[in-house]
Amino acid sequence: MSDLTGRRYGKLTVAGPTEQRKNGYTVWLCRCDCGGEILLDTRRLQRGTAADCGCVSKVRPGRRDITGMRFGRLTAIEPTGETVGGSAVWRCSCSCGGEVLAPLHQLTAGYRKSCGCLSRPARKEFIGRRFGRLTVTAYAGKRDGMHRWRCRCDCGNETVVGQTPLQTGKTKSCGCLQSEIYRENLKLVDGTSVTILEATMDRLIASNTSGHTGVYLDKRRGKWVAQITFKGKTHYLGAYAEKQEAVKARKRGEEEFFEPFLAEFAAKAPQDTADGGP
């Protein structure tokens, strides 16, 4: 048996061995710098799972002390005294400034590495940046897990756009860009004359009472339904209690289905040049 008498472990100084044994290991009397005493077996001392009598770490005997240890973006502050599935729950600070309670086994296994900030898109600094025809003017808050930005379009209108559609280029205008392209014909695309209006847009039929293409009232359910027809196929966009929500869904559908189609054809269409060249 190695003599640990006089050795220091954190705030503890080993005073000497006792007659007690724990799982075959010698139990030692340890004195803390605060004046307290604690009995610890050889294995706990050598593994460093206790660094004081409990005056600082508040770790109960038999519990691992991870005070100050980092796990990803988390730093363990103190145990809460609670347990989950037999694992001590620790209060941890995150490098983003947040705090979270996490069970020890999740921290040591690598399942918890942040307060949750890693699992959601971080807010960017978009004010003043341009995305297509849009210039970001202000942060508009967060809704449905997405950061949203207030933008001014080159046409003069304002709109609120999600951070992801801006970053991916899915939304490039307040809606005026699609309207302008729709009014034009792209000709001689792959040798075929294409009318964008006929190829992509479903017209407002006479029986439509909403005043918006692709939005109608389902009287049986008492809800406004949004849908879109693209290349001969009708896509259901949801049913809403408020007509304006259905109109918004229809607009999102136009961005999803029409914009990529139009961008593809615009890229293939012959470009006019100032000098009349090819």
Image: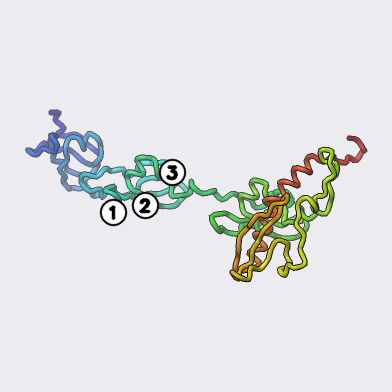
Residue 73, disc: 3
Local packing at callout 1 (Cα closer than 10 Å; few below 14, some 14-19, many 20+) is few
Closer to the camera, 144 or 274?
144
Q: Position of residue 164 (x, y in %)?
A: 61, 49
Q: Quadrant of residue 22?
A: top left
Mark closest to the chain's N terminus, 1 or 2: 1
Q: Nearer the viewer, residue 151 or 256?
A: 256
Residue carrying label 1: 82
Q: Neighbour class for label 3 at 10 Å: few (<14), some, many (≥20)?
A: some
Q: Who's the residue at 72% across and 64% down the image?
A: 212
Q: Amino acid at mark 2?
A: Leu
Q: CA distance from mark 2 to mark 3?
A: 13 Å
The amino acid marked with disc number 3 is Arg
Tell me how far mark 1 sits from mark 2, CA to CA: 10 Å
Label ID, residue 101: 2
Q: Quadrant of the C terminus?
A: top right
Is 176 in front, or is 93? 176
Task: Find out whether the residues at labels 3 and 1 contact each other: C-beta distance under 8 Å.
Answer: no
Q: Dot 2: what SS?
A: strand
Question: In this figure, which colouring scheme has been used for the structure?
Answer: rainbow
Helix or strand or loop: what does disc 1 sit on? strand
Residue 127 relative to residue 1: left or right: right
Check the image and name the residue furthest to the top: 1
Above or below, 236 relative to 6: below
Q: For residue 198, say whether it is visible.
A: yes
Q: Nearer the viewer, residue 15 or 63?
A: 63
* N-terminal-most mark, 2 or 3: 3
> Which of the two discs, 2 and 3, sits closer to the camera?
2
Picture quadrant of residue 3: top left
Give coordinates of residue 200: x percent, y percent: 76, 51
